Image (spheres, rainbow, N blue to C red):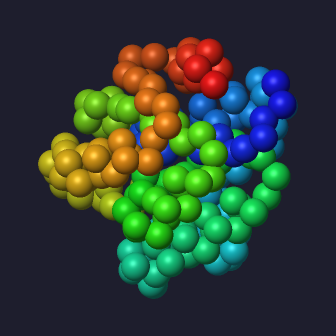
Amino acid sequence: MQLTHHLILIGPMGAGKSTIGRFLSEQLNLGFIDLDKVIEDRAGASIPWIFDIEGESGFRERETAALKEVLQEPPLIIATGGGCVLKPENRSLLNTAGQVIFLEACIDQQIERTGKDKNRPLLQTDNLEQKLTEMAELRNPLYCEVATIRVDTNNKPPKLVAQEILNQI
Ligand code: S3P
């Protein structure tokens, strides 16, 4: 399949954006970019370090710069970070960038998939369920606003989700 636009994966932490993105990349023979990785490469530092030194606002500035940079490339599969939809500027960029696929995951699945992760600064909390619920309340309407396709990932292996996406595009 020859794509003329980017395929951009959005959704909460633990939705499987990077894993599913890699499967799509193999199936479509298209490059894959993980936006978090671009941010880390450009900063020469890890995401926890960026949050530590520059705060979330510093990270968000870097995220917008990285998004602008990758959208200039020829068609790619792009996995974004869960908070990429927070800034209106990013949502406008996503609106005109290609197919935007919202990978939906319930709170229980997110906890199962991210529970012990030390690389996600926003999840280093005593009450993971509460934090993820607050984020979902704020962010779910924003994911819906920019999504062109929505796919439920709950209790599904990433390969199956990737196949469902391929059937829809
Ligand atoms: C974040 C999600 C992370 C990463 C950063 C902030 C968020 O990416 O960008 O820790 O605000 O939801 P993943 O969704 O790939 O974990």
Q: Examine the rendering and report whether any part of residue 36 can be seen.
A: no
Quadrant in which the N terminus is drawn: top right
Determine the residue positioned at 72% across, 44% down: 5
When the figure is inspected, residue 13 is found, relative to residue 149, above or below; the finding is: below
Determine the residue positioned at 15% across, 48% down: 130
Total number of numbered discs in the rendering:
0
Residue 30 in the figure: left or right of residue 104:
right
The spot of residue 72 in percent (x, y) is 75, 63
* Residue 66 in which image quadrant: bottom right
Residue 48 in the figure: left or right of residue 142:
right
Q: Examine the rendering and report whether any part of residue 67 can be seen.
A: yes
- Farthest front residue in view: 96
The spot of residue 16 in percent (x, y) is 50, 35
* Residue 107 in which image quadrant: top left
* Residue 159 in which image quadrant: top right
Camera-side residue: 69 or 99? 99
The spot of residue 24 in percent (x, y) is 69, 29
Quadrant in which the C terminus is drawn: top right
Determine the residue positioned at 69% across, 45% down: 6
When the figure is inspected, residue 37 is found, relative to residue 160, above or below; the finding is: below
Camera-side residue: 76 or 134? 76
- Farthest bottom residue in view: 53
